[in-house]
Image (cartoon, helix red, strand yellow):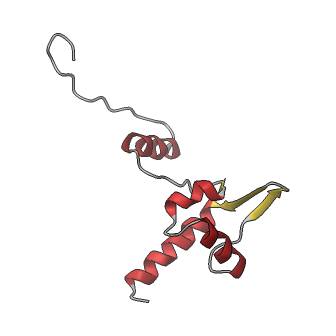
Amino acid sequence: MTNGITQPPSITLFNNISNDIEQMADNLHAKYLPPQGMSRASQLLPFLPFGSSTLWAWSRDGRFPSPIRLSNTMTAWRNADVIEWLNNQNTRINDGV
């Protein structure tokens, strides 16, 4: 506010659509899983309807995408695989399966 006059909100334009989506998600405090790249379990859990132990169990028995071991102490999932799995779950629910 300047001199009692309220300024309208400004709109910021970006050059890259991926950056646009991430920026909008940050502005809306929304969860966003980028389709490219990989994520660790702690980064995926906010998007999943279950907890850590189910994530690992379902990954082992094939009900969820398998993780990739990046090192002796680091495992991650491909974001594209997780997004595809989530979309398939929504399709099953919508189809009444």
Q: Specify the quadrant that holds the N terminus.
A: top left
Question: Quick one: which residue is furthest to the left in this view?
Answer: 4
Image quadrant where residue 40 sits:
bottom right
Q: Residue, x 51% and y 41% (percent of image)? A: 19
Considering depth in this image, is 20 or 55 the residue closer to the camera?
Answer: 55
Question: Quick one: which residue is furthest to the bottom in this view?
Answer: 97
Relative horizontal placement of residue 79, taking residue 68 as reference (left or right)? left
Total marks in image? 0
Q: Specify the quadrant that holds the C terminus.
A: bottom left
Q: Position of residue 16 (x, y in %)?
A: 51, 41
Q: Is residue 9 above or below residue 79?
A: above
Q: Residue, x 39% and y 88% (percent of image)? A: 96
Q: Is residue 8 above or below residue 52?
A: above
Q: Position of residue 29 (x, y in %)?
A: 40, 45
Q: Is residue 92 above or below residue 49?
A: below
Q: Is residue 25 above or below residue 53?
A: above
Image quadrant where residue 53 sits:
bottom right
Q: Position of residue 90 (x, y in %)?
A: 44, 75
Q: Residue, x 76% and y 63% (percent of image)? A: 68
Relative horizontal placement of residue 50, taking residue 8 as reference (left or right)? right
Q: Position of residue 86 (x, y in %)?
A: 51, 70
